[in-house]
Image: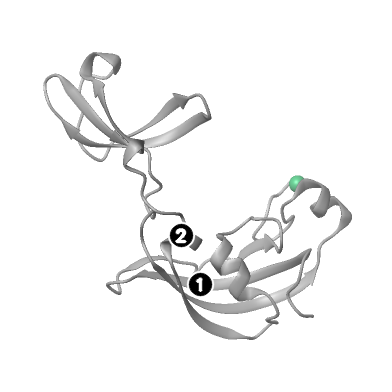
Amino acid sequence: MIISENAVVLFHYTLTDAEGNQLDSSTGQDPLAYVHGHKNIIPGLEKALEGKQAGDVMVVTIDAADAYGERQEQMVQEVPRTSFQVEEMEPGMRFEAQTPNGPVSVVVTNVTDELVTVDGNHPLAGKDLTFDVKIDSVREASEEELSHGHVHGPGGHQH
Ligand code: ZN
């Protein structure tokens, strides 16, 4: 079966950045499972997988704009130190920030006595990403999977 809209696709991947650093990999784990055509994965990768089938391998580099988007400097903000109910603050800590658009995960990038700098960009925003992909299997989604918009069973939701 060819990958097209509403196919359930299971694939293994290794993700590297433009410098060749490995960022993530499914090696030694279950393959990643998604429903094709439902924006479950980044747009550039979904597009690259269209028309492929089980057993296919490919290496594809995806521009930041078609991956996790460009970095947005307005997502970097300075917040008064006093607005955190935490004794110790240091770069690298993560918080959920409440915004008008819902909760956003932010990372602390700088701390002074007065101010904390937080960055709400996705950690992979602004990066061109290379995926080394091997397609494990392709099947039709069930009615239930389509109504939920995600895969059930191995590599997917267990409910
Ligand atoms: Zn479900």
Nearer to us: label 2 or label 1? 2
Q: CA distance from mark 2 to mark 1?
A: 20 Å
Q: What is the x, y in percent for residue 148?
A: 77, 46
2 and 1 marks in contact (CB < 8 Å): no
In-image side of 2 versus 75 (left or right): right
Q: Which mark is residue 84?
A: none
* Residue toward you, 50 or 33: 50
Q: Residue at x 85, y 59 (%)?
A: 142
Q: How is the image coloured?
A: one colour
Location of the N terminus (image quadrant): bottom right
Q: Secondary structure at mark 1?
A: strand
Q: How many marks?
A: 2
In-image side of 124 versus 103 (left or right): left
Asked whether mark 1 and ligand 1 are closer than 8 Å, the reply comes as no
Q: Residue at x 71, y 61 (%)?
A: 37
* Residue behind mark 2: 65
Res. 147 in view:
yes
* Residue behind mark 1: 13
Q: Is residue 4 above or below residue 87?
A: below
Earlier in the chain: of badge 2 and badge 1, it is 1
* Residue toward you, 149 or 26: 149
Q: What is the x, y in percent for residue 66?
A: 50, 62
Q: Is residue 30 above or below residue 2?
A: above
Amino acid at the residue labelled 1 = Tyr
Q: Secondary structure at mark 2?
A: helix
